[in-house]
Each structure stands twice: as structure tokens, then as C-alpha cells.
Amino acid sequence: MILELDNIVQRKNGQQILSDVDLSISMGAFFVLMGPTGCGKTTLLRLTGLLDKPSSGCIKYRGEPVPYRGKERLKLRRRMVTVFQRPVLFRGSVNSNVEWGLRIRGIPEDEIGRQVSRVLGMVGLEGYENRDSSTLSGGELQRVALARALVIEPEILILDEPTTSLDPNLRLSLLRRLKDLHSQTGITFIMATHDFTDALSLGTSGAVMRSGRIEQTGTIDEIFYSPSTPFMASFVGMKNVFPAEFSPDGAVVEELLVRHTSNRRGHGFLAIPPEAIVVSRETTVTSERNHFTGTIVSVERAGPVFSISVDCGNLIIVSSVTRSALSELGLTEGRDVYISFKASAVHVF
């Protein structure tokens, strides 16, 4: 592991912002830190970048505890760079901004010019060397900040919600750029975001925060497709999340017996993906082990599909259907329907 945080607590002005945070970040990973606004992501990034000191707990770099003062800490900080959500550039040219980190490290003049040209090419800003920083657009400003970070060849690059202030086109362009840069450099990237698209597009591993604590860590697929708590299921957009009592026969949800493939026993939760639920006007003979009847209580557009809410007797189950299926089946409020789904589609936690 390149970076480990053990039992980190952070307090500020008498308020506890982070509680018992444990994280391990692998060398070369693109680690994505997710969570709602105000959950503590930026505070945690400042600690990982050694910009702040924790109130208690231990931060380890390559297995060794980091010092909290002195030249050794400064040496470690110089191996990491943080690019904030709204990066601030110095007055002057793009060139003077990008070369700054090299100059304070005493790099020879000819090498500075070569390195600056190299990283400006990496971020797609060839020919911008003499542009005044005050004339740059939001997307250009972000790319100059990236070039300024990359030119010193850090071991860890920390990004605090870099796409938040960009319009959709610039945002997609920056996402592609970040993915390419990670692939080209092998640098460990740590990025905070509240946007699922960023995480799914870029992340190899990550964590989700909630109220200053880590709710779940793992690979991106584990986080999005195997949530471990009701909060996580809701956070990643799972629908049809219900408390249930599990037995060898299945899971009892309200008065329905839901078949699943888990060995779970006792109290827990289950989730049924809306896209896995088949809606029909007549009962059908299929391989699905779960069959229920109900009445449509609402039909709502949800992007390219429609969400059909079906009252199955004290339990509202939501299914996703296409426009053509909606029209062909005549799915309207008040209509009685059948719904079915496979036991293997039921997610248990």
C-alpha cells in the first residue's frame, strides 16, 4: 500500500468532522472518494495530502508512519500534489505557472523547458506557454493546474471534485484526459467526487463516506453492485430496497415471500433492480421464481425509460419499462398487472 489511514479522527472548533476512518490505497490505483456534500471528503483529502494533521490516528506512507513536523514531512509532501476544486493560478503566463514547482526544486533551465513542453502536451495545451493565466477558461485553468501538478512527477495526485464547475462538454473531456493521464503516468490518483459517472469512468477502487465515517470500501464494482448497507443501496441508486426476515424458504417482505439465492438468515435487507422486473398483463410461464399481482399506482418518465410503481399489497415495487412496452401493454394508472423477477436478481445485505 502506498497510503494507509488508521483510526483517523479530525476535530475542528470543537466539532468532530471525521470519526474512526480506516483506508488503504494501493500503489498506482485510481482511488475515488465518494459521498454527499458535507460528509468530510475535502477534510480527508487534506489529510491524505499531508496538508493538515489529524487530531488522532496514524497515516502511513509505504508502510511507515508519516512525521508530523520537520524536513522529513516536507520531503513526503513534495511527493504529493493536491489540485483543488477551484485551482488558483499565479499572475503571469501559463509557462511561469507550470514551471514553478521545478524552479523551487532547482531543476536546470534547459530541463525545465523540456518538462513544461512535455506536460502541456499531455494535457492538450500545446502552444499555450505564453498565454496569460487571467485569460483562461474554466477548462483551460483546470488543465494548467494539472500540468503544474504533473510536471514535478508526484507519486500521488489528489483531485478535489475537479469536474464540478465545468459545463458538460468540458467535463467529459476532462474525464477522458484524467483516464489517459493515469494510464500514461502510473501515478496513484486519489479523487473526491459526488458524481457516479466520474467514479464509474475512472475508478479502480474507492470508498463512500457518510457523516465523517467510511461506509464502504472496495473495488468500484463491489461498491456499485454489491452495496453492504441500506444507505449504500440508496446512494448508488438501487430501488426497491426493503427490510426483510430471511429463512430457508425465502425472505418475507411485508406479506410477500421473495425467493433469492442467498444463505442469509434473520433480519436484513434486500433490493430488486427495477430493470430486472418484468411487467405483463397476463400471467406467464417463465423461469422467474417470483410472481406477484398488483395494481399500477403511478407511471413516471425516468430518462429514456418509464418507472412503473405497482402496489402488491402494502408493498410498492418499481419496475423500469421502455416506451414501446408501455404503449404495447397499455400500462396506465389503475390497471391490474403481473410482475415477475428471478431469484438471482435479488440483492441481499
Image (spheres, grey):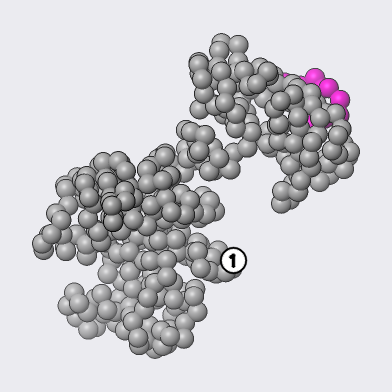
Check the image and report above or below for 118 versus 38.
below
Q: What residue is rendered at 22% in x and 50% in y?
A: 55
Of residue 193 and residue 212, the one placed in the foreground of this image is: 212
SS for callout 1: helix
Q: What residue is rendered at 70% in x and 31% in y?
A: 317
Of residue 302 and residue 123, the one placed in the foreground of this image is: 302
Position of the N terminus, as image quadrant, is top left
Residue 28 shows in this picture: no
Mark 1 belongs to which amino acid? Pro
- Residue 4 position within the rendered picture, expressed as x and y whole percent measured from the top left: 26, 45
- Residue 155 position within the rendered picture, expressed as x and y whole percent measured from the top left: 27, 59
Left or right of residue 224: residue 252:
right
* Main secondary-structure element of the magenta-colored stretch: loop
Which quadrant holds residue 79?
A: bottom left
Left or right of residue 311: residue 51:
left
**Magenta stretch containing residue 235, yes or no?**
no
Which quadrant holds residue 295?
A: top right
Q: Which residues are magenta?
A: 278-287
Check the image and report above or below for 24 versus 115.
above
Left or right of residue 333: residue 34:
left
Residue 170 shows in this picture: yes
Check the image and report above or below for 100 versus 282.
below
- Looking at this view, name the residue that lies furthest to the front: 14
The residue at which mark 1 appears reads as 168
Q: What residue is rendered at 19% in x and 80% in y?
A: 108
Q: Residues within 10 Å of mark 1 (few under 14, many from 20)?
A: few
